[in-house]
Image (cartoon, rainbow, N blue to C red):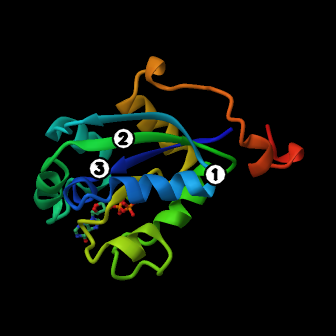
Amino acid sequence: MEQTFIILKPSTIRRSLVGDVISRFQRKGLFISGIKMMQLDEAVLREHYAHLVDRPFFPSLLRSMMATPVIVMVLKGKDAVAVVRAMVGATNCRNAAPGTIRGDFGMSGQENIVHASDSVENAGIEIKRFFSPEEIFDYAMDTTPAIYAPDELD
Ligand code: IDP
Ligand code: MG
């Protein structure tokens, strides 16, 4: 089944929203394959946000992402990348639809609660960037038959 990569950003840690955000993913039916706390540094953020390094807000984004440790997660589920992006909502929380994580929990474009991979290819790259193979767990969940029909499991 598909895996996607999430960061609970410092805005989530500082505002004590960790439980609320993780709870949304779990209630949806996504499984946690990996989870840990870590302090991001400039080198890894320059890789992770390579598409933004030339933008004027990049120094501010760097400071924001290093303000506290973050929680990184690997979530597993059918079409997990697209499902999680839809749950997260538009980049700027003020434009994000109510009912999405950013739409419900934030007011900012920068301080927008979570990162989520934007494609299956990038999910694979990001998981490798932040997790070693032994930190990712593949285990059976008793709830699977209540979450998926047999023909939805691959
Ligand atoms: P995404 O997180 O929705 O995929 P990206 O365009 O990949 O959005 O941007 C990565 C992160 O950079 C955003 O989540 C946000 O924290 C920050 N960011 C993007 N655009 C802006 C901006 O215009 N001002 C400030 N921060 C921004
Ligand atoms: Mg992005």
Q: Which residue is mark 3?
A: 49
Few, some or many residues within 10 Å of mark 1 (<14, 14–19, 20+): some
Name the foreground residue: 140 vs 83: 140
Q: Nearer the viewer, mark 2 or mark 1?
A: 1
Q: Under 8 Å from ligand 1: the CB of mark 3?
A: yes
> Which x, y percent locates residue 7?
36, 48
Q: Position of residue 93 (x, y in %)?
A: 34, 75
Distance between mark 2 and mark 1 Cα atoms:
18 Å
Please determine whether, in this image, residue 117 is positioned above or below residue 11: above
N-terminal label among 3 and 2: 3
Residue denoted by label 2: 72
Task: Say whether residue 30 is left or right of residue 16.
Answer: right
| Amino acid tagged 2 | Val
Q: Which residue in the protein does label 1 denote?
A: 29
Q: Residue at x 27, y 77 (%)?
A: 107
Q: Give the CA distance from mark 3 to mark 2.
A: 15 Å
Along the line of sight, the residue nearer the viewer: 39 or 63: 39
Residue drawn at (46%, 64%), measured in percent from left and top? 88
The answer to which image quadrant residue 82 occupies is bottom right
Q: Residue at x 24, y 53 (%)?
A: 13
What amino acid type should be assigned to the residue bearing mark 3? Tyr
Quadrant for the N terminus, please.
top right
CA distance for labels 1 and 3: 28 Å
Q: Which one is earlier in the sequence, the residue at label 1 or at label 3?
A: 1
Q: Secondary structure at mark 1?
A: loop
Q: Looking at the rendering, in which quadrant would you find the C terminus? A: top right
Where's residue 5, x and y in %?
A: 46, 43
Q: Is mark 2 within 8 Å of ligand 1?
A: no
Which of the two residues, 24 or 120, is positioned nearer the viewer here?
24
